[in-house]
Amino acid sequence: MGKETVSMLSDNPAVIQTIELLKRRWLSEKAFEIELTRPASFEFKAGQTILFIHESIKRYYSLLSTPDDPNLALCVHYVPKGLFSQVLAGAEIGTRFSVTGPHGYFTFRPCARQPVFVATGTGIAPFVSMARSEVTDFILLHEVEFAEDLYYHNLFRKISFNYVPCLLKPLVGDIQPQGAFHGNAADFMREKLRPASYDFYLCGGREMTREVTLLADDRFPGSYVFKEVFF
């Protein structure tokens, strides 16, 4: 995930710190979770990111962790020919990395309007951090190709009655997740989301964020849109 962001908390987010890889767990063939040490002085808000610096490569990743967790955790989209996801996928436990942060303004803002979280793939990460930080009463649309890509669905089902898996390529014969919608998040909003003013939080690919932003402007007047975009 790449994002142009600015820190909300750090006096000098450009200060480089060293963190160490502690664990790695594969969630599917497309994604894995890693746990890393947390520098003693590292403070952040749910939804913020860290920037990895590896040789000439720089990559932002949203934190899964809560601000109170002792370690840092990330959900990484594995790209077989990617420049950096392969490094994280193959690094030995104990490998050290250089990072800066925290970065970003994609944090939850309590409001009278109903919050609607919309994610594609591993864009679910900041919403995991928010949910684990006791943000509740949200609608969550998670747009993925297949049911196996619904990372952290058990967490969200426990927290929100309004968790909607949006499946782009449901397989014939597969057991469908409870409440699954066949189509993308924007299609669900057109067909199922009642007219009202919302706070939309979008994290994922450009196509989704663009389509949902335009739809929010057109069909849900008075709504606010906050977004993090992959590129």
Image (spheres, rainbow, N blue to C red):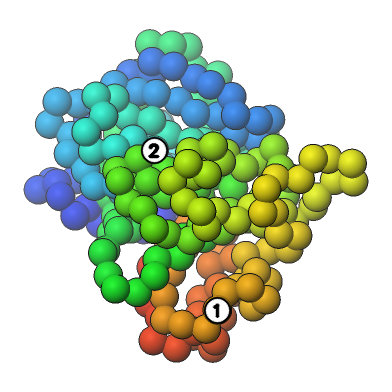
Q: Is residue 145 visible?
A: yes
Residue at the spot of label 2? 64
Residue at the spot of label 1? 194
Q: Earlier in the sequence, mark 2 or mark 1?
A: 2
Q: Is residue 147 left or right of residue 160?
A: right
Residue 227 pos. (x, y %): 42, 64
Residue 119 pos. (x, y %): 53, 55
The residue lying toward the viewer, choosing from 46 and 190, is 190
Q: Is residue 193 left or right of residue 173?
A: left
For image coordinates 56% across by 58% down, the residue present is 141
For image coordinates 36% across by 53% down, the residue present is 136
| Snapshot quadrant of residue 180 | bottom right
The residue lying toward the viewer, choosing from 113 and 52, is 113
What whole-number distance in Å separates the C-alpha atoms at marks 2 and 1?
Answer: 30 Å
Q: Is residue 120 visible?
A: no
Q: Amino acid at mark 2?
A: Leu
For residue 38, above or below residue 30 = above
For residue 6, above or below residue 188 = above
Residue 168 pos. (x, y %): 75, 56
- Dot in front, 2 or 1: 1
Q: Amino acid at mark 1?
A: Arg
Circles 2 and 1 in contact, beta carbons < 8 Å: no
Secondary element under disc 1, as helix, strand or loop, is loop
For residue 161, above or below residue 177 = below
| Snapshot quadrant of residue 193 | bottom right
- Mark identifier at residue 60: none
For image coordinates 80% across by 50% down, the residue present is 170
Pointer 1: residues within 10 angstroms few (<14), some, or many (20+)? few
